[in-house]
Image (tube, rainbow, N blue to C red):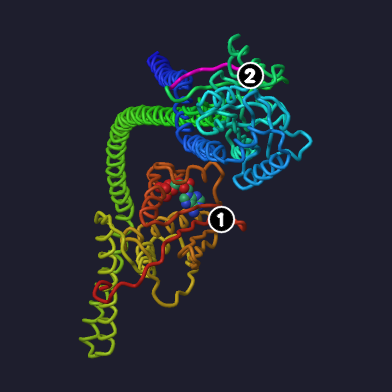
Amino acid sequence: MIGSTENTHRVWTRNWAVALIAGGVALLLALMVLLFPALERVYLSQLGKREASTLTLAVEGLNGSLRRFEALPGLIAERPDLAQLLRDPSDTLLIDRVNDALHQTAEEVGLSDIFLIDRNGLTHAASNHWKDLSFVGQNFAYRPYFTLALSGDQGRFFALGTTSGERGYFFAEAVRDGTEIVGVLAVKFTVDAFEDAWRDGTNDILVQDEAGVIFMASRPDWHFRSLEPLSPEARAAIEDTKKYPMDQLVPLQTSQEVFDDRFRKVEITDNSGGTERFLVQSQMIPEAGWKVSLLTPSEQAWTRAVGTVALSALLLLLVGLIATVVIQRRIQLQERIRAALSMQEELEHRVTQRTAELKDANALIMQEVEERRAAETLLRQTQTELIQAGKLAALGQMAAALSHEFNQPLAAVKSFARNAGAYLDRGEPDKVRQNVGMIDDMVDRLAAISTHLRNFARRPGEKTEPVLLNRALDSALVILEPKMRASGCRVNRDEIDGDIWVLGGQVRLQQVFVNLLSNAVDAMNDVPDPVVDLSLDMDGGGVHVRVRDRGTGMTDAEIAQLFDPFFTTKEPGKGMGLGLSISYNIVRDFGGTLEGRNHPEGGAVFSVTLKLAEAPSLAAAE
Ligand code: ADP
């Protein structure tokens, strides 16, 4: 239950964080979309400011030309030939001279045309007199520059030449004869060169007159168009002065938006329906009443604004993405740490639990060990007591035979002593010495028997040490000699070269051999020529001592119980059934083994295997 609540909490936290980031990013994106027009205007302003110099240059260029040509009509009008010609227009020679002079002047100063008009508007001489479309003979009385000049003012006018069909700017001044105005001198300069220069740049430039008609433009198709529809009065005035071709006075399809005191956005749709967007800035040339406008394609500002928004959006998304990833990572890390902590807690809990269980089990084992140890101690004690009892019983059994054994030598000693006395009386010292020597032998033998008996009766030490196998066998045979002799048993014993040291206890080992030999003798009670084979060999496992008899052997049931305490087949009073059991335990204490089986050729064979030991140092051996 707790786990599932935690999970829900985690998922909730994660979703919440992601939603917050997504919401923030969306909000910022929306803000950017809202701010887009403002951003676009900023870029448009920057663009306009950058291009403002182009407009200034164009205005300065136009102004320069106007100023340059402005003074010319006045200067030329002062030539006396002109007034004279106007006084006498029939003087063909003078006309030719004036024509040539005007042509030459036009060439020199870069004017398109210079022409001389009389008071009625009729042209008498012109720099283009030699051309087919010469002004000579044309009447310009309808032109405002003519009427203005005739009244004494400076006439200036922009118009499409009615004769030449070329757009041009006209300046006119009165030609005076004395103080009397006798005619007008007009000059015209064309504007094509300006337009050619304007076409080189990325911007478009157009010039409008007071009425708003575009009379100069870097694009020829804008000529005589207007950005806004013309008023009827303006149209009428144009028609009167034949300023522009009326059929071309069609407004452009535009839409305008002013966003700054300097700049405005203008969309121009051409005849084919294609729309172009411009940033427009204008400057006036007051003397001429012109408005010069610079049109800069505004796409780049729009593109920059879109680019900025897109880049910012991308950056925002990236930041959002990174934030999401970082938060996800952090949450994952926290989850992992939490999981690790809970796993650790679980582990610690399990360890504590397992430790408690182990402690309980340990206590149980300790208790069992204690019980086993107590049982073992009891068993050992019982065994020790049994060994002792067995020894005492054996001692009891042997006591009768031993008393016989002791009595015999004692009787012999007595008779040797008596004989020695008799030989002494008879003066036979050699015989005396012989008898005394025999007495000595007998006493030695009695002492040996006595020593073995004392050893037998003593409780054996528990520890094992290197002991001489030869000596143990010898002692056993000495102890059993009376029994063997009584039963007429022979011992067929392997010769042993040198001392063989084994791990054990001298008395206990001797006791084992006494038991085995004694049993062998017992087993051959009814055998005519009883023989015990005592053989010995060594291998990697240790020393093997085999005691083999020629008796009746053992049944399988007997073999199975041989080493059980109190198992005996002997009649009561003859056996206690402890010999083999005790011997088995003794040999096991020595780290050896005791086995009993039937010999293939009849009789039983008992094998004692003992561990070989290093000979102890001399002092210890003694
Ligand atoms: P005990 O000699 O007092 O009976 P042991 O433990 O020495 O006790 O022997 C147990 C029994 O094992 C004997 O009663 C006998 O039946 C059998 N046994 C031991 N040695 C021999 C042997 N060499 N041949 C046949 N049976 C044997």
| Numbered disc in front, either 2 or 1 | 2
Point out residue 258 in the picture as x, y percentages from the top left corner.
48, 18
Would you place residue 380 above or below residue 481 in this image?
A: above
Point out residue 238 in the picture as x, y percentages from the top left corner.
63, 17
Q: Decide whether the magenta segment is chiefly helix, strand or loop.
A: strand
Q: Residue at x 47, y 56 (%)?
A: 520
| 25 left or right, relative to 371 | right
Q: Dot 2: what SS?
A: helix
Residue under circle 1? 603
Mark 2 vs 1: CB contact within 8 A: no
Which quadrant does the N terminus fall into?
top left
Residue under circle 2? 241
Residue 446 appearing in the image: yes
Using the rendered view, name the quadrant where residue 103 is placed.
top right
How far apart marks 2 and 1 lie (CA) works out to 168 Å
| Depth order, front residue of 111/573 | 111
Looking at the rendered structure, the kind of residue marked 2 is Thr
Q: Is mark 1 within 8 Å of ligand 1?
A: yes
Q: Which residues are magenta?
A: 251-260
| 221 left or right, relative to 396 | right
Assess whether residue 479 is covered by the magenta stretch. no
Would you place residue 353 above or below residue 27 in this image?
A: below
| 419 left or right, relative to 8 | left
Q: Residue at x 41, y 51 (%)?
A: 584
Neighbor class of circle 2 (other Cα within 10 Å; few <14, some 14-19, many 20+) is some
| Depth order, front residue of 283/78 | 78
Looking at the rendered structure, the kind of residue marked 1 is Gly
Q: Residue at x 48, y 29 (%)?
A: 285
| Depth order, front residue of 457/219 | 219
> Residue farthest to the top?
232
Point out residue 191 in the picture as x, y percentages from the top left corner.
62, 35
